[in-house]
Image: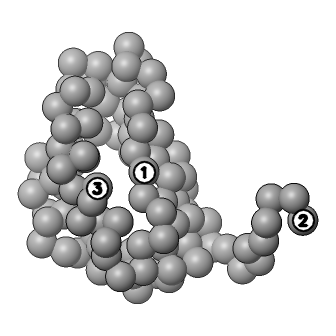
Amino acid sequence: MIILMGYVHLNPSDVNEFTADVQAVVSSTRAENGCLFYAFTLEDARAGRMLTVQRWQDQESLTAHVERHESAPFLKKWGNRMRMDILKYDVSNERSFME
């Protein structure tokens, strides 16, 4: 399993537009094969900081997500307008929080 977690930094004036664009792809992303969890949330509007947490079944699923045709316009539009501070983690021992 792969977990992505971290921040997307934007110009604060772009937060509403970015949020709308992300929400437009959330449902289809969550329906993708291998997507176990996918969320973006606004952490600090004045700082232009969004938090993302994603769980993917494997690297192949994540790669397919990044390469799908719906991702290209989003990345083209926002690629130069955002700074990503997102880390990828390989998970090998998933268990309940209380264990």
Regarding mark 2 in the picture, which secondary structure is present there? Answer: loop
The CA span between labels 3 and 1 is 7 Å
Q: Is residue 97 left or right of residue 48?
A: right
Q: Are the residues at dot 3 and dot 1 in contact (C-beta closer than 8 Å)? A: yes
Labels 2 and 3: the sequence-earlier one: 3
18 to 16, vertically: above or below? below
Please tell me which residue lies in front, 33 or 4: 33
Residue type indicated by callout 3: Val
Tell me whether the residue at label 1 lies in contact with that at label 2, contact meaning CB atoms closer than 8 angstroms.
no
**Sooner in the amino-acid sequence: mark 3 or mark 1:** 3
* Mark 3 element type: helix
Q: CA distance from mark 2 to mark 3?
A: 31 Å
Left or right, residue 77 beside residue 28? left
The picture places residue 11, in percent across and down from the top left corner, at 27, 23
Checking the image for residue 87, the label placed there is: none
Distance from Cα at disc 1 to Cα at disc 2: 25 Å
Give the residue type at disc 2.
Glu
Read off the residue under disc 2.
Answer: 99
The image's mark for residue 26 is 3
- Residue sitting at x 37%, y 19%: 45
Q: Residue at x 29, y 65 (%)?
A: 29
Q: Which residue is mark 1?
A: 39
For badge 1, the amino acid type reads: Ala
Circle 1 residues within 10 Å: few <14, some 14–19, many ≥20: some
Q: Quadrant of the C terminus?
A: bottom right
Q: Give residue 37's position: percent from left, percent from top.
A: 48, 63
Residue 54 location (% of width, % of height): 48, 60
Could you say which quadrant of the image residue 30 lies in? bottom left
- Dividing the picture into quadrants, the one containing residue 95 is bottom right
Residue at image point 22% right, 56% down: 25
